[in-house]
Amino acid sequence: MSEVRNITPRDMPAVASMFWNMFKTTKASVPQSLVDYLSKLYLHPSRADSDIISQVHVRGDGVLNGFIGSIPLRMSLDGSLVRAAICGPLMVEDYADDPLAGARLLRAFLAGPQDVSLSETANETSRIMWCKLRGSVLPAYSLEWVRVFRPAGFAIEVAAGRFQGMRLLAPLAKPLDAASLKLSKGSHPDSAPISEMNGFVDSDIDCDSLAGIIPSLLERFSLRPVWDTPDLEYILQEARTKSSYGAMYSRVVRSRNGVPVGAYLYHGAPGRIARVLQVLAAKEREGAVLDSLLNHARSNGAVAVRARTQPHLLQAMMVRRGIFFQRSSTVVHSRDSRVLDAFTEGNAFFNGLAGEGWNRLNGDDFN
C-alpha cells in the first residue's frame, strides 16, 4: 500500500531525478550539484523549524514517485510569532497511474505543525487541490507584470523560451526596435509618464548591507518575515546564482538625506528580459523605486522587465504602462483568521525573498 512519509537523505537522488525530468528540457544526466542543492535546501534549511519537514510519496512496491518540498519561515503578526511553511515543488511521476498521490502529499503538507501554509508557484492542478482543501487564492499576489522596452527583442526572448536557436535572431531586433521608435516619433514610453525619481538616488548595495536595511522596509506590513541576519544573508547569497536569467543586480534607493526608501533585486543581461526577484518600498515611494528599477534595467540593455505583483505595488505598476498576466497562483491555507485577513487586506509581505523565488530551483541550470 502506498504511503506518505518524511523525506530522508537516501531519497534525494530519486527526488533530483524527478525534478530534472519534469522541469528541465535537457536530456543530460542529473547533475550531482542538483542532488547536493536539494539536500541542502530540504534536509538542512538554515531557517529550520525541525518539525516542518518535506514529504515523499512511496508506491506499494516501494518506488518513490512523489515529493512535496517544505521550507520553514518565521513571521510576525503584530508582534506575535507565526510559523509558516513555504510549499516547494509538488511532483508526482506517472500521475495517471496514481492520480491521488498529489492530493495525499498536499494534505500531508497542510496538516503540518505550521500556522500558515503558502505557495507562490501553484499551477492550475495544484490550485484546484489547494482550494478543495480549504486554501485560498490571492489574486493581487498572483499576477506577473511585464514592462516592455524593445518589442522586437522581447518577442525573440519570449520565443527563445520555447524554441532553441531563436536568440540567433537577436541581432535583427535592434534595427527593428530602432525603426519602431523612430516611426513613433519618439513617443514610445521608456518609463512612467512622469518620473518620480526626482530627489532620489540609487546605487549598488552588497548583500550584507542590504540585509541590514530590509527589516526597516518591511515595517509597513502587519504580517512579515522575521529573519535572523545570517539567515537573510544566506537567502541573498543563494539568490545570486541563476544561470538561466543572468547576473543579479542589487540596488538601494535613497532620499537626498541618505535614508533608504526602497531597494530592488533583479537578474538580467543585455538583450534579455530582466527578471525581478524583489521590490521593496516605503509607503508612497513605490513609484520612485519602480522608476529606478526600470531606468537601471533599460540602461543595462534589457528588452523588458518582468516582476511578480504585490498589493502595495499594483497602483504604481498600473500607471507604468505594463502588461499583467497570470502564470501561477499564490495560495494560502491557515486556520487563523487574522493571518488570512492580513493577506486579503494586502497587509502581508510574501513572494520573492519570502517565498520560493530566491532559491536556485527557480532559474538555475546547475551546470
Image: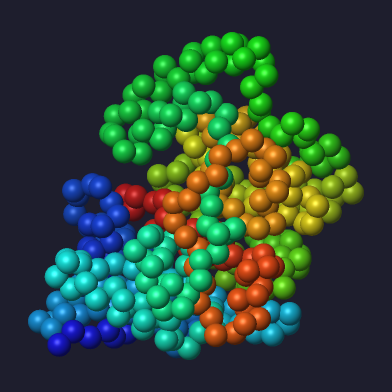
- Taking the spot 60% from the left edge, 38% from the top edge, the residue there is 322
* Image quarter (top left, top right, bottom left or bottom right) of the N terminus: bottom left
Query: Residue extending furthest front?
Result: 132
**By what rule are the colours in the image chosen?**
rainbow
Total marks in image: 0
Instruction: Please state if 247 lies on the left or on the right of 350 as rendered.
Output: left
Q: Residue at x 16, y 80 (%)?
A: 59
- Residue 255 makes an appearance in the image: yes
Quarter of the figure with residue 278: bottom right
Observer able to see residue 46: no
Taking the view exactly as shown, the residue that stands out farthest to the right is 257
Q: Nearer the viewer, residue 290 or 343?
A: 343
Q: Where residue 198 sits: x, y (%)?
A: 84, 37
> Which residue is painted at 44% across and 86% down in the image?
112
Residue at the limit of the structure toward the left, as seen here: 61
- In the image, 339 versus 21, the foreground residue is 339
**Horizontal and vertical percent position of residue 50:** 46, 86
Camera-side residue: 270 or 187?
A: 187
On the image, which quarter does residue 41 sit in? bottom left
Q: Is residue 111 above or below residue 142?
A: below
Q: Is residue 246 above or below residue 30?
A: above
- Residue 282 to residue 249: above or below: below
| Residue at the spot 68% in from the left edge and 68% down from the top edge | 345
Q: In the visual, does 160 lie left or right of 181?
A: left
Q: Would residue 113 appear left or right of 225 to someone viewing this image?
A: left
Q: Position of residue 315 (x, y in %)?
A: 70, 48
Quarter where residue 188 is shown: top right
